[in-house]
Structure formats: structure tokens, C-alpha cells
Image (cartoon, rainbow, N blue to C red):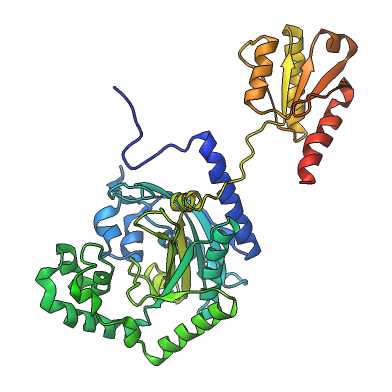
Amino acid sequence: MSYKAPRGTTDILPEDAKKWQWVEETIKQVCNKFHYEEIRTPVFEHTEVFQRGVGNTTDIVQKEMYTFEDRGGRSITLRPEGTAPVVRSFVEHKLHGLANQPTKLYYFAEMFRYERPQKGRMRQLNQFGVEVLGSADPAVDAEVIDLAMTCYQEMGLTSLKLVINSLGDKESRENHRQALIAHFTPHKHELCSDCQTRLQNNPLRVLDCKQDRDHPAMQTAPSILDYLNEESEAYFEQVKDYLDNIGIPYEIDKNLVRGLDYYNHTAFEIMSEAEGFGAITTLAGGGRYNGLVEELGGPNTPGIGFAMGLERLLMALEAENQVIPVDRSLEAYVVAVDEQAQKEAVMLVSKLRKHGVQADKDYLGRKMKGQFKAADRYAAKYVLIIGENELEEQTITVKEMSTGEQATVAKDQIIDVMKEKCVGGREHE
């Protein structure tokens, strides 16, 4: 039998893992500048967290969740998205009671969705996300968008488009909901089966349908912007003003609704306009979700957040020909000529590592020539040679591979010398 990774999943091999590490580290640095802190939640939750938090009428809950019953008869779901688990944790640990508010959080997490796999969209996917809980200030909406845009810009992406919309408050949404039902009902039987169901349960989702996007009724559908009450309209104007003030260009898309039930007021997506990126251009999406904390048993607490797919981010970097600065070289490779030298090599490698030097050695019993070839394959910056003369004279020969220059270093000084060359060199980069 040939064993392969399950459909919709992939292995991230060491060469690519370095790219992921660079992406994640770059994002963490941005989060630190914005004063956001990391949170980690379980990979699975009680199913009710997503049913209540995401919404029973969404495609995620109805079609895409990996749900199973555990041995105790409890319904468990592998997390399909990150907001509901973070809000559940916020409520459970009473983070709303902390003195410093709002609570600003970020996460890196694997998500699981049962959908048709395609390039950049897997059944096991990786997301970075941000959640801000405890503030209804429209300036926070602008800050969250700014953080997302900054992440992309820090990695060199330029072909970006930000689209925004307002979904309004509860009153505005209800008025818009009734207008959508009245608009689409005469065309109900022309729509896909999903939209026929959505029309009664969640008509806003009809606007997000990929199958019926070219139906004439879509082009004439009533816009939420025409149903915003005075308060919602003022809120949206403030968000746009803040974006203007900090210099973030945007377009307004009246049909942008997002796919989850908990959104209200600000909704946004960031898209790639890079040539050859693909038909699905969305890189990140999010919005405000006042009311979600209450749905999961907490106090009245406003919130806003977004999630970006890391697979799609890497695709965008490739589409814009951005070279990820990954250093695949090894700092020090220790070459030993015989059994006694091997014992010294083991001790030397261990000491180098403990003092911050990246080091390795041969473990396959290669001859000296083979060890030098291995050092070349690892792109070692320095080769430390322990031969008969070195054993006798208590020295180490240090060869700088880029220049071929060699120096003899006393055994008791080798750690200090290599720390200066490697650790000191990193600090001055």
C-alpha cells in the first residue's frame, strides 16, 4: 500500500518551512509594534461554539465542518475558523475584567474545512488572525485594517487592493434583510438551491454566492448602504476618515458581506492584483462583530478582527516575485579524521551550540574528503578541523569556506573565537 497525505492536506518540507518561519516572524514583529499579544486555543472545540459563534446558516457550519462524537458522546469540531474560539477563551477566562482594555490578540492556527481542494485553498489550512475585544471606536477598525496592510507591505507586496463596506447595526441589517427578500423572491426558482434556502434564513448570503454572481438580479439588488440608519452611516464615515488620514486607499464594495453571521458595521477584504495570481484573489478578510461575545455567554463587548491565509500569502509573494530572505547556510561544521578526533568533535559541537553557534558534524562515518563535501552541501561558513596534529598540539584548524583562509586556534580559545565570528557577526547584521 502506498501511503500519502490525505486529500486537501500537504507536507511543509524543511526547505519551505524556512519560508513559513520568515513569514511568521515578520508578522509577529508587526504585531509587537501594534502592541498585540499572542493567544493559542485548542485545535478542537465543542461544536456549539461554532454553531452559535459562526451561525447555523453559514456554509462553514452546514457543509464544511469536521465534526465527530468523542468517546463521551460529546459533539466535537476541528476549528474551521479562529474568531469563535478566541471569543470563547475571552469569555471563559474573563479577559474582559482585565484593567487594560481593549484586549488585543493575535494567533497562528491550523483550520479544517471540508471543501473542494484547489490551489491556495486546502482542507487543512493555516491562518494568521487578529481580534480586538472591548472597543466600539471606529479608530480600532482603521487600526486593524492598518495592521493587516502593514503585514503585507513589510513583506514587499505592492499589488494590493482594500475593499470595504458597512453592514450596519441590527436595525439597518433587518431593514436591508426585508428588502433583499422582497427583491429576490420573484427570482427564487432561478437561483441555486443554496440561495433558495438562504433567501429565508440569511438573505445577505445570497449576495456572496459564487454560482449566481452573474444573475441579473444580483446587479440590481438593494445595497446595504441605502439602508444604513444615521448612527451606522456616521460610524462608516468615521472609519473612512481614519483610513484617509493614515493614507490607506480603499474601494467601497456594496456587495461585500463576508461569509459569517456575526459581522456588523465594518467589513473588509484585502485582495491581490498581481498578474497570474489566480481567479480567487482574496488574501484576507474580516470585520466588526459586536454581539458575538454575548452569543458565547459573555457581557456586551464589541469586537473586530480579520484572518489571512498563509498559503495564499506565500502565493502572493511568489506572484510578485518577492524573494524570501532565507539563509540556508550552516555556521560551523566540525571535521574529524579518526575515532579519537570524533570524540573531541562531539564535545566541541555540543559546546559550540551551548554558546549560541549553529554547529553540526558527520554521523555517517565518512572519510575526511566526504566530510568536506558534506560541509559544502550544507554551505558551511566555517569548517573546524580536528586531525592528528590538532590532537597532539591541542589546537583546532578553522577554515573560512568563502575565502579558503585557514587559522590555527588554541583548543581553549576556540569557543570565544567562533562566538566572535558567528554570534557577534549576527548581532552586527
> Taking 169 as reference, is 190 above or below it?
above
Residue 216 seen in this snapshot: yes
Name the spot of residue 318 as percent of width and height, x first: 49, 48
Left or right relative to 163: residue 148: right
Q: How many marks?
A: 0
Which residue is at the front of the view, 208 or 161?
161
Quadrant holding the N terminus: top left
Give the residue at the far front of this rendering. 275
Task: Indicate the position of residue 258 as horizontal and vertical percent values.
Answer: 35, 68
Task: Reply above or below: 132 against 227.
Answer: above
At 37% from the left and 41% from the top, the residue drawn is 9
Q: Quadrant of residue 243?
A: bottom right
The foreground one among 226 and 317 is: 317
Q: Residue at x 63, y 56 (%)?
A: 29
**Residue located 46% across and 69% down the image:** 162
Given residues 381 and 294, the one toward you in this image is 381
Note whether residue 96 is visible: no
Q: At which x and y percent is residue 392? A: 87, 9
Residue 229's place in the image compared with 278, above or below, is: below
Identify the residue at image location x=60%, y=58%: 154
Horizontal and vertical percent position of residue 362: 65, 17
